[in-house]
Amino acid sequence: MENRKQTESRDQSARRDFIKIGLGTLAAASCGGGLCSCKGKQEKDTIELLSPEGEVIEVPAHHVKHVHKTVGVSREEARKGIPGRKFVMVIDLGRCKNARNCITACQKMHHLPEDKEWISVLLMKDSEEASPYWFPKTCFHCDNPPCVKVCPVDATFKRSDGLVLIDTERCIGCKFCMAACPYSTRVFNWDEPEQPEEIQALDYSPETSVPSKIGTVEKCDFCPDMARMGKLPDCVTACPNGVFYFGDENEDVVTNGSETVRFSELIRDKSGYRYMEDLGTEPRVYYLPPRDRLFPWERGLDDLSDDIKDRFKDVLEDI
Amino acid sequence: MRSKFIYRYIVLLGCLVLSLTFLKSQDEGVEMMRSRLSLTVIQKDDNKIDLQADFRVRKERSYERMAGVPVIFLISRDSINEEIGEALTNEDGAAILEIEAADWIAVDTQTITFIATYEGNDSISPSDRDATVMRANLALEGLELDSAQKQVQLTLIGTEDGTMKPVASAEVNLYLKRLFSNYKVGSAETDDDGIALVDFPSDFSGDRDGNLDLIAMVEDHDLFSTVRTARKLEWGQKIEEGEQELPPGLWSTDAPMWMLITFIVLMGTVWGHYIVIVLNLFKIKKEGKILTS
Amino acid sequence: MTISDKAKTLLSEFSGPLEKSTTISKIWIFFLVLLIAWGMVGLYYQVRYGHVVTGMRDHVVWGIFIANFIFFIGISYAGAVISGVLHLLKIEWRKPFIRIAELITVIATIIGPVFILLCVGRLDRLHHLIIYPRLQSPITWDVLAISTYLMGSILLLYLALIRDFAIYRDSPELKVPNWQRKWYRWLALGFRNTPEQNRRIEISMQLLAIMIIPLAIIVHSVLSWIFGMTLRPGWHSTIFGPYFVLAAIYSGTGVLIIAMWVFRKIYKLDEYIQDKHFTYVGYMLLVLAAGYGYFTFSEYLTHWYGSEHWDMEVLHKLFNWEEYGGLFLFANLGGIVLPMLIVAIPSLRKPGWITFGSAVMVLAMWVKRYLIIVPTLETPLLPIQDTRVEFVYYSITWVEWSLTIGGLATFLLLFTLASKFVTIIPVAEMSETKAESVHLKMETT
Ligand code: SF4
């Protein structure tokens, strides 16, 4: 009994050390320049850092590098898809109030600069009489993807788990896929991506989409690196209103983090639809019509910075 | 195996970095942050108990989870507190310590109290929480009434007067484990024999062998806290990996046959002629040479 | 090899530019080199700082570079038509300007693809097109079609040149530096005007003339499919293939007329490129203008009549004065109506006027290409919202202008240099009347 406790506590203290390393890493990350403040990182294997408690601790240098949430699989592996999965997303338009947390969470996850979005929220109005609604738009990961069809070098590809990803180490940047995407989902790195050095030094994987590369195309990837760990994409968990449901169509279950529902029932009972079904692109993103709204649409304009508000100027004039 | 461990290690480290960013920024403020703990005792069917303490810290208007916080678990017997162990909160803010049930509570024990405490530091206030439980066990069994109808039978027994007896009128929830979360299949109340029956739909797909992971739980019970059991049943539809692939389309990596053939025929014809023409040029050259010599 | 008297006179008449450069031509070349240097500065900026220096952004992903690309491939049709169609039909009056046409073809087919390369974000990965090819992509089709077409055009040009090279080689009167003569000797391949050699050239040219027409059609159809295969309003159209082909032949003919006029002026070729030639090509232009106008009308009429939401959005932009109204009007008046009027009215059917009409038309055709690309890209299916404000509209930057002008200057420079190396009039072909060729054959046997 006594013995066991001792080993346990030794175990624990080992783990506590490990946490300190974590804290130290944090300190490195939060001092802005990251590695810049570390002296003699070449000669020494350890780095001195300041912990939140105010004590100086030593941390192995190679730990500081892991600044991204996950470690991506290799480029070859990333082409295959996660076996047995078929990812699907459902977006409940009745709940969105343009809180834009999905956008910022996505930017944080993929280390994007503030003005580069992989998710956007549009203000839509279907007919003269209908009231406007907010329309979050991710990549639709179509089953008949027009963008993949046109890629001359197989840089963007469709996987068995339904995802459409891009290998930006192969992409030649012809932008044909951007012209072909009917939903204007893809974004281009027009100049050298603004990312911290430690992010740029990471090993690239199409599953993490990190780091960005100049002259190539990128877009929402449904975070397969998180799915491999059984975790939801950050946009899903970041949404305060549970707008995004994500899951595996094979399992027939989707979740927005707090509710878990059957995918087929949700689509059947709430008349889920796919945007512009008539284009034949067969998106993997479903929308639930904007019924039973949680918020009046005007609420979506509150708390927007002027920059963002400007983006909706033209639509607001029409409404 | 080793690489897997390192992988996890790195992942956890990454998570810590992110979640602890908050801690750091808060640290600069002078104000103390209030913390809150909640404690769930999860009695599992393998005679083990999970002590799960959820740690939250108050930031602005809401309580937020925090990782890397050391939580100490104690057991209180006859008003003597004895330390069981310590665990760190994960990125969901939960510190989980698994203990052997038999080591700490016997069946004939009436009640037992567990305590979770956090000692606090310069910026976060200390907090603690206790939970009092009795020993209980939940069993899960699949019943195939006929090929179409399936039921799950859940049996709950708990300590009463020093022995384990069926527990009546307890609500049991049945969950199906899915990739990102557990789907609630249904719930039922136990009868006098401690048995609850939940209908199970037959159209869920399982893994490659058709296995489904079922989890049944009595949650937040007055006497037993949480009692939990899990079992794999071969009730799902099989997912064949071959079926996974979408039928090939224009978007596939390889071009359709007709396109390849058209291409080869067209290019072959044209470039074939070019070759003939270039050969002609060489012949012209040769003829010229013969002529001059 | 004996050279006929006619060829001798022809050569002495046209050998001027080959033998020495005038001051004007030197200044001209210097000027072109300056423009190209300016283009290089633009290129440096684009390579150094990425595509931010262009006006292209996430919505308008392609800009004038693609318009230039279509334009240059379009004018390359000059040669394909003249040497293909007119050769097969054995139309005699094509002879004086056949070389001009073929030079336009080859040079334009070299310049055109450069512009598509300028749209590529990672030039350092161009080899991926070969190591990871994907046959389903219209870009792959384009790469294959254009390289095949270029190869064909070069062969055609060269085959026609062999006899001339032999003449240059064997004319001691031609005062060219030694190295140049060496080149002629090498390029003439030991052509001795034997019936066997003549037959080989004849057969090869016949083969190429037949192939170059379908090839040209394929090249421009494939080009149009880059747009036609996408699901975008204004692009997703079944007539895009033939529409582009016709537009290309049309603009190619226009450039040919301009070149004929310019060379006639500079080299005083009035005797060979006569007014009647302008009239003939003018008639061709009229027919092509009518055809092109018909396609244009049919394209917009269908969209307007059907008035689908997205098509209408694009049409509104084209008919709106504040957006593309002015350019659209110019593209149609200058590109269709004006050339037709000039050729149709007998008093205007003069080389000067026809050339003027062609010049306006060629410019209008460039504008038209711009109008195909940009308004459509500014009208995606999902409204442009929630995007950086500067991403909404396209505007051409100085880098794009300098590269465009640099490209044009390169085209002109290559043309000028070519005209200093070979006679602009095909000497051998011109000197060949039927009687003479019989005579030649007898001589050699
Ligand atoms: S931009 Fe890249 S991913 Fe897109 S089509 Fe071109 S090569 Fe493929």
Image (cartoon, rainbow, N blue to C red):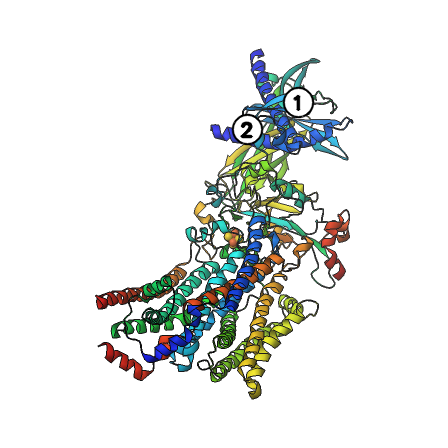
| Residue C66, quarter of picture | bottom right
Vertical position of residue A106 compared to residue C69: above or below:
above
Same chain for labels 2 and 1? Say yes or no: no
Residue B261 x %, y %: 37, 61
On the rendered structure, is A45 left or right of B26?
left
Residue drawn at (30%, 80%) of the image: C437
Q: What number is the disc on residue C273?
A: none
Q: For the view shown, which residue lies furthest in the top direction?
A: A2
Q: For mark 2, give the secondary structure.
A: helix
Q: Is residue C443 visible?
A: yes
Vertical position of residue A48 compared to residue A77: above or below:
above
Viewer-side label of 2, 1: 2
Residue B3 x %, y %: 48, 30
Which chain hosts label 1? B
Q: What residue is pinned by disc 2?
A: A62
Viewer-side residue, C385 vs C262: C262
| Image mark count | 2
